[in-house]
Image (spheres, coloured by chain):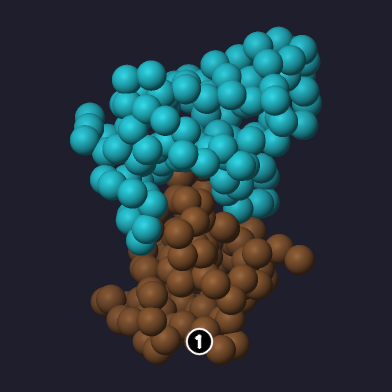
Chain colours: A cyan, B brown
Amino acid sequence: GAGVSQTPSNKVTEKGKYVELRCDPISGHTALYWYRQSLGQGPEFLIYFQGTGAADDSGLPNDRFFAVRPEGSVSTLKIQRTERGDSAVYLCASSKQGPLNEKLFFGSGTQLSVL
Amino acid sequence: QKEVEQNSGPLSVPEGAIASLNCTYSDRGSQSFFWYRQYSGKSPELIMSIYSNGDKEDGRFTAQLNKASQYVSLLIRDSQPSDSATYLCAARTGGANNLFFGTGTRLTVIP
């Protein structure tokens, strides 16, 4: 696609529910990142994929968070038993190759609100 | 201590002035530095990257890096109202897969 696409743009859910956030990176970009941005804060790293594999998941806050990228393009971030503290904008970014010095292209984000 | 620190601002400058944005980082192993611009409600957009000590100029933007002082700055010359945004500083440690972002500095250019 022309840019990184994220759906939905907004998601409202209730505490304890399960949510899935989708990211469709730029065609041909092998690297894909998930970040989380709370109000007034900078993006916080969650997980990085190189191809189909999660090369670095050190930013996932706990085992309620999980992400997949089964075919090396579209990725889904999954959050189980959502908590109010999970409310934030979830940003996806992609880049052409590996992590070093590459320009990240960000999607417009998914605003997650947990009531 | 946060990996990357910025003054959250807000920073206000008159149109046509120079805006100076500053950032410090804690990891001496950091090798790559980036400035992103983020308009309200929008996603971050890369405007400058710098890897070596000294200055790097691109149009009205100049990035400055001082590794000895662990300091990165961004200068915006001839500031325009369209430059009003939050500017995020980011650092990557050599070999690391993630960018550490600061909290951002909100810049307002007053017409």
Q: Is residue B97 above or below residue B58?
A: above
Picture quadrant where residue A14 is located? top right
The reply to whether residue A93 is visible in this rendering is: yes
Q: Residue at x 29, y 38 (%)?
A: A30
Q: Is residue A51 above or below residue B23?
A: above
Q: Is residue B5 above or below residue A102?
A: below
Q: Secondary structure at mark 1?
A: strand
- Residue A71 location, x and y as percent? 32, 20
The reply to whether residue A10 is visible in this rendering is: no
Tell me the chain of label 1: B
- Residue B76 location, x and y as percent? 41, 78
Query: In terms of depth relative to the viewer, which is nearer, B79 or A36?
Result: A36
Residue type of the residue flagged with mark 1: Asn
Q: Residue at x 59, y 24 (%)?
A: A66
How many numbered callouts? 1
- Residue B12 location, x and y as percent? 58, 73
Q: Residue at x 41, y 23 (%)?
A: A69
Image position of B7 (left or right of A34): right
Q: Residue at x 61, y 71 (%)?
A: B27
Crowd band around label 1 with a 10 angstrom C-alpha radius: few (<14), some (14–19), many (20+): some
Rendered-image quadrant of the C terminus of chain A: top right
- Residue B109 location, x and y as percent? 50, 70
Picture quadrant where residue A19 is located? top right
Pointer 1 residue: B66
Query: In terms of depth relative to the viewer, which is nearer, B90 or A84?
Result: B90
Query: In terms of depth relative to the viewer, which is nearer, B94 or A4?
Result: B94
Picture quadrant where residue B71 is located? bottom right
Rendered-image quadrant of the N terminus of chain A: top left
Image position of A81 (left or right of B12): right
Q: Is residue B30 above or below residue B55?
A: above
